[in-house]
Image: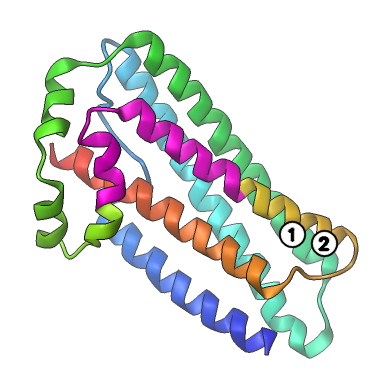
Amino acid sequence: MKRRLVKLILGVVLISVSIVCLHAVMVVNDPVAPFVGKTSIQIGDMITDSASELLQSAAEAYLFLNEVEIAGRNGLNVNAALQRVDMAAARVQQALNLFREIIVSGREAGYEKNRLAKLQTFSYDQFARENGLSTEEMSKVSVYLGRGNVLGFYRRHALNLQNLLGTLQSIRADLLQGKLSENRVLWSLLQQYNNTMIFGNYASMVFYKI
């Protein structure tokens, strides 16, 4: 049962992430962040680095699930699974560290008013419909960007990363005891990756559009 469950989860999430990555090259990637001066470029670079860390973390998480998948034949290779989870967690931690720096830098620099105004007048629902996106997920993005609260959006993304890291650490604790986490934890892990990347990706599409 667990083997079939993980296969289903893995297939669905891989398809979902593939679709997400087709919409934009990076997750939460804004080439011109809406802040004053050179800080905008510096933040853009850090966002790109954080997006890369998150995507690499997701790759490690999927390889961990592959270990779960093939465990049905010969039993779980705990060391291999633990290695994948450790790498996934390290990448998420680095992505989180970068976003904490981004928030501090953005707060100190202040917003660039013209670019901020474009976010406030952007038609989020219309853009979602025209591009076949989830209006429900886009509404979560517009709660922040539509009000010009870019730092609030970044804080929400950082919280998503923190929660994802907590789930990975829980899975790691189970593996250290020589056991696999319950199905609900695996579901949560994959759902968190999916939600975090969609949240960031939709914002990325908006930033590119404006």
Q: Can residue 204 be seen in this view?
A: no
Res 64 label: none
Compared across the picture, whether 49 is left or right of 113 comes to right
Residues marked 1 and 2 touching at CB (< 8 Å): yes
Compared across the picture, whether 30 is left or right of 160 comes to left
Residue 70 percent coordinates (x, y):
71, 82
The amino acid pointed to by label 2 is Asp
The amino acid pointed to by label 1 is Ile
User: Residue at left 41%, top 64%?
Assistant: 17
Residue 43 percent coordinates (x, y):
38, 23
Q: Is residue 148 magenta?
A: yes
Q: Could you tell me which secondary element the residue under label 1 belongs to?
A: helix
User: Residue at left 54%, top 43%?
Assistant: 161
Res 171 label: 1
Compared across the picture, whether 95 is left or right of 186 comes to left
- Disc 2 crowd rating (10 Å Cα; few below 14, some 14-19, many 20+) is some
- Disc 1 crowd rating (10 Å Cα; few below 14, some 14-19, many 20+) is many
Q: Does the magenta stretch include residue 199?
A: no
Tally the marks: 2
Nearest to the observer: residue 153 or residue 209: 153
User: Residue at left 15%, top 31%?
Assistant: 120
User: Residue at left 25%, top 35%?
Assistant: 145
Quarter of the picture holding the N terminus: bottom right
Residue 187 percent coordinates (x, y):
58, 69
Q: Which residue range is magenta in the image? A: 139-164
